[in-house]
Image (spheres, rainbow, N blue to C red):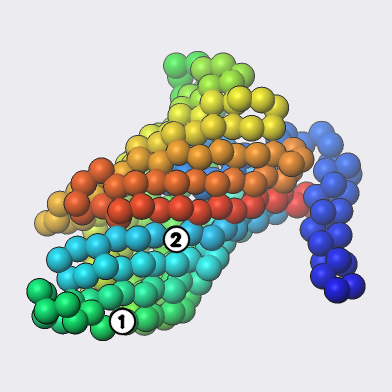
């Protein structure tokens, strides 16, 4: 019990202390929990950890499938005024009920677990914006062929995105991305185009509500489209909690996604 209390005190006191020592830094801007990635980079000399849990449910003609990410973690390091280094790793558990003979009712369970989406990349801000003129950044990363063999790509898999952010007022901002990546989906490996558009509305100094439409179009397959919404809650200017819920808009997309997480910026 004493150890648990000590750990809780570290997590509560750490952000408060770091903010008190670095009160001149801007408020935290996270890249989670939406699919859209913001155009902002973390301040130079700071470390930002964004981690959370996510549950995805999908089904198709082969049976029902649930996928857990326990957790997904992104580490962002401010290396220059306009650039950050990004490291990502997910611990993925996939449980699938596959119909070996559709119509028979026989649904054996298959479970796969291990690390996936081990990525290294960078985000570079090209220029700032104002009003209708967006802030623009580029994001490039590679997924490494490490982790569970069921999830990892057969070789280094690149991804690139162009990130836009329009801040129309102190309370309303729109973020939108377009990109392309090499990606492993089930047993197939190939390229897919990506898009995401998010509106962020600042309800109070502590709460931000967001809504998003997103999707991807794999090569030679039908596109997937979905929508999500959720809340971000700033406990401190450098500590944020979030929750999110999403549903698919077509048969190719997952049925639903729910999740939540935490983002903490640790100044140097």
- Residue at position x 60%, y 39% from top? 232
Give the quarter of the image for residue 41: top right
Numbered label attached to residue 55: 2
Find residue 227 and report its image quarter. top left
Residue 154 vs 134, above or below: the answer is below
Provide the secondary structure element on which disc 1 rests. strand
Q: Residue furthest front?
A: 105
Q: Position of residue 146 (x, y in %)?
A: 44, 78
For the N terminus, the image quarter is bottom right
Q: Is residue 133 left or right of residue 8?
A: left
Q: Which residue is mark 1?
A: 109
Q: Position of residue 55 (x, y in %)?
A: 44, 60
Which of the marked residues, 1 or 2, is nearer the chain's N terminus?
2
- Neighbours of disc 2 within 10 Å: few (<14), some (14-19), many (20+): some
Where is 132 relative to 155, above or below?
A: above
Q: Nearer the viewer, residue 263 or 139?
A: 263
Q: Foreground residue, 84 or 90?
A: 90
Q: Is residue 9 visible?
A: yes
Name the spot of residue 112 as percent of width and height, x first.
Answer: 38, 80
Task: Note whether residue 193 is visible.
Answer: no
Residue 143: numbered disc? none
Q: Residue at x 17, y 77 (%)?
A: 105
- Mark 1 closeness class: few <14, some 14–19, many ≥20 residues within 10 Å: few
| Residue 182 as seen in the image, left or right of residue 177 | left
């Amino acid at each position: 019990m004493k150890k648990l209390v000590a750990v809780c005190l570290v997590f509560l006191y750490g952000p408060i202390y770091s903010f008190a020592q670095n009160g001149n830094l801007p408020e935290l801007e996270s890249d989670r929990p939406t699919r859209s990635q913001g155009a902002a980079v973390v301040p130079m000399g700071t470390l930002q950890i964004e981690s959370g849990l996510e549950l995805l449910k999908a089904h198709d003609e082969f049976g029902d499938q649930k996928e857990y990410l326990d957790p997904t973690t992104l580490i962002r390091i401010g290396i220059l005024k306009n650039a950050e280094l990004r490291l990502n790793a997910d611990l993925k558990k996939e449980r699938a009920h596959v119909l070996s003979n559709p119509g028979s009712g026989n649904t054996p369970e298959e479970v796969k677990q291990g690390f996936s989406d081990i990525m290294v990349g960078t985000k570079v801000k090209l220029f700032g914006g104002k009003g209708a003129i967006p802030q623009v950044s580029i994001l490039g990363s590679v997924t490494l062929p490490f982790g569970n063999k069921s999830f990892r790509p057969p070789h280094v898999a690149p991804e690139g995105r162009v990130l836009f952010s329009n801040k129309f007022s102190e309370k309303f901002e729109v973020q939108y991305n377009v990109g392309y990546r090499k990606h492993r989906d089930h047993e197939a490996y190939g390229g897919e185009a990506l898009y995401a558009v998010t509106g962020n509305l600042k309800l109070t100094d502590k709460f931000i509500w967001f809504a998003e439409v997103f999707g991807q179009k794999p090569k030679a397959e039908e596109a997937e489209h979905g929508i999500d919404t959720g809340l971000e809650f700033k406990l401190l200017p450098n500590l944020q909690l979030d929750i999110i819920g999403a549903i698919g808009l077509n048969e190719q997309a997952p049925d639903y996604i729910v999740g939540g997480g935490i983002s903490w910026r640790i100044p140097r």
